Amino acid sequence: MGKEIFSRPARLGALITGDSEESIVHLFSEKRILVRLEAPFQEVPDARETFLFAVNQCLRFCSNISVCVPEGSGELARACDSLAARIHGPAATVEVVGKITSRSFDAVINVGTDVFCDLPSATINSTGWVARVATAGSMIRKLCWIPETPNAVGALCASCFGVGAAFFAILGRPLTLSMETSVFNHEVASPGTLEPGPPLPASPLWLEGFLVGCGAVINGWAYAVKRLPIAGRLQAIDRQALRLENIWSYVAVGLESVSKPKAVVVKELLSPAISVTERPDQWEFFKIRLDHGLEVPPLIVAGLDNVTTRHSVQRLWPETLIDMGAGGLQSQVIVKRKNNDGLCLLNALTIPPDEKDWAEGLAAATGLDPAIIASDPTGAINQAEVDAAPADKKAELQKAVGKPRCGHINRQSLEMEGYDPDFAPTVPFVTAFSGIRGAAETMKWLMGHRYPH
């Protein structure tokens, strides 16, 4: 895997510690994390979701993952081996241990109620929409837990808290915290304080909309939505194919997805409950369909890292836009309703001075004139454009003479995009957290809880 292995989390680890990215990758390859499921939680569906999602995320920044599961939970151990093989290759497995016998682990994530005050640990659980965490330094011996009907969003958010604590522990920066948060009303309080929120519907609710961007945050959204009572139809728009380095922050993918269009990956994940039409397309090219009969749906869900495109999506003014973002240790979700004076993306997000216009970015990648890309994207590439292109772009453009510009640009994005050393630092527990919060907002919207946030 070379330079790609753990690259996104390592860059963030280097920013936190001040060490080199290479030393952080080495640390990730040497440290050991244990994920444990307490026996009383063996048959609790949400606890099992929390456990498996914690293993999933830890494997994306640490090579040495061990699990401790109750007797008779062989299928959980096998599921963990399957995750390891998907992420690290067919020979990869997780170690199964019977109990915690020594200080041989650099971080422990315990799903249940016991808080290990003498270990670098975090204990996590959930009740309905509420996710909880308590770390070793919090002085809590037992983390509150109240049984409730299953709700994946609370369970998955709890997992993000535990994995985040483990990440900081193996960096030598252990966290001290005890808290719970409601994914339903966004309150934060001491454990055992918040209401679990309304139960999820017994039958699936129908979702119809656009999914714009199919990157790390949308991976978190899709992972959660797959586990919620939601059916429907979506158009998924993303111009890129999945690359090896994406695996370290995309929680729904494995090696089998590398080189597939990201929109196809999401389609495969959400099938069969949600029928997805994949659109491996530039957003501005996809929008052309709106001039030819395609209607703006009532809900658009977006997970983009480009402010210009986020503004462009907002300007469609759907009934509701759920916009999700993540960067470093920051998570962001904005819900904007059309007929409400709540904050919209045009006012919330300022375009950075160094961010290129969409056509300029495509021009730099392809050698085409940005003005022509913007004004006539469906027109055919001609010889004059080849002659005017930079020398390193002429050969590919020559092959595309007579073909639509948009088709050539989309092919370049999917097939020719190279490794970019200028990537942003990302970790799975932040990108997934944004997506899960967005999935919670989607579920609430379908249940009739429609308001800006």
Image (spheres, rainbow, N blue to C red):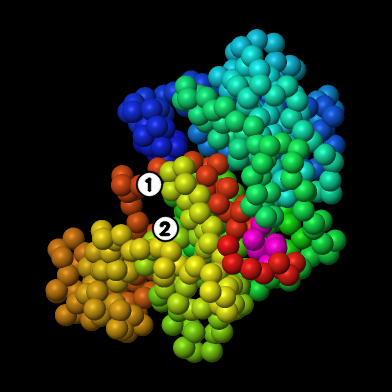
- Please tell me which residue is depicted at 40% across the width and 32% down the height of the picture: 16
Task: Classify 301 as above or below 112.
Answer: below
Residue 275 can be seen in this image: no
Q: Main secondary structure of the magenta part?
A: helix
Q: Nearer the viewer, residue 384 or 438?
A: 438
Q: Is residue 352 left or right of residue 309?
A: left
Tally the marks.
2
Instruction: Please report contact status of discs 2 and 1: CB closer than 8 Å, yes or no.
Output: yes
Give the left or right position of residue 261, taking residue 362 as reference.
right
The N terminus: image quadrant: top left
Which type of secondary structure does the marked residue at label 1 adopt?
A: loop
Tag 1: amino acid:
Ala
**Extreme residue in the bottom direction:** 292
Q: Which residue is mark 2?
A: 305
Task: Kindly state the secondary structure of the residue where label 2 is placed.
Answer: loop
Q: Residues within 10 Å of mark 2 (few under 14, many from 20)?
A: some
Please state the horizontal and vertical placement of residue 183, each as a whole percent of the image.
67, 51
Is 441 included in the stretch rendered in magenta?
yes
Magenta segment, which residues? 440-445
Residue 424's disc is 1
Answer with the quarter of the image where residue 400 lies. Answer: bottom left
Query: Residue 18: where, in percent of width, then height?
Result: 33, 28
Q: Looking at this rendering, what residue extends furthest in the top direction?
A: 102
